[in-house]
Amino acid sequence: MSIDWVKAEERPDKKQRVKGENLMDLRIKINKLEKQLRKKLNTVENLSSEMYEFGEEVSVYKQLLSKIDREIKRNGKITQDQFYEMLDKFNKKDEIS
């Protein structure tokens, strides 16, 4: 005897006879779904963490670009040496924080 879902929906408080095999099938399906859900939650958590770290990196590079932009506006240009000097200082500052 399979589960009469219509009957269960109409009268959820009413008892039904169900084969143990049907219950085991449901249990297997539920376990599979729970496992899939855990995997997806882990994936979401990992992606969220990666997005946060990426956002932090973007912020750091925006600061560097802003500094370079200010230097260019002040002097009208920036030399390659100045660029690498700023980049080096910036990387050292980033390593400290």
Image: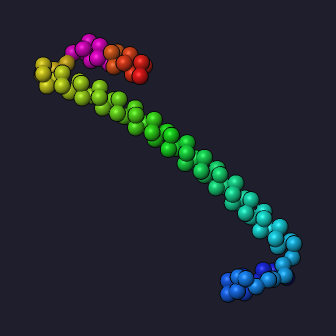
Image vertical order of residue 38 relative to residue 2, above or below:
above
- Residue 84 at least partly seen: no
* Residue 48 shown in magenta: no
Task: Give coordinates of residue 51: x percent, y percent.
Answer: 46, 41
Q: Nearer the viewer, residue 84 or 67?
A: 67
Residue at the extreme right: 20
Q: Name which residue lies at 18% across and 25% down.
A: 70
Q: In this view, does 45 lie to the left or right of 10?
A: left
Image vertical order of residue 59 relative to residue 45, above or below:
above
Task: Give coordinates of residue 14: x percent, y percent.
Answer: 76, 85
Rendering quarter of residue 37: bottom right
Image vertical order of residue 59 relative to residue 11, above or below:
above
Q: Quadrant of the C terminus?
A: top left
- Residue 22 at least partly seen: yes
Task: Give coordinates of residue 83: x percent, y percent.
Answer: 27, 18
* Residue 82 shown in magenta: yes
Image vertical order of residue 35 relative to residue 67, above or below:
below
| Count of labels in the image | 0
Q: Name which residue lies at 38% across and 16% down.
A: 92
Rendering quarter of residue 79: top left
Tell me which segment is drawn in magenta: 79-87
Rendering quarter of residue 13: bottom right
Q: In which quarter of the image is the N terminus?
A: bottom right
Q: Name which residue lies at 55% across and 48% down.
A: 44
Q: Which of 47 and 7 is in front in this view?
A: 7
Q: How is the image coloured?
A: rainbow
Q: Name which residue lies at 42% across and 19% down.
A: 95
Q: Which of 60 and 84 is in front in this view?
A: 60
Secondary structure predominantly adopted by residues drawn in magenta: helix
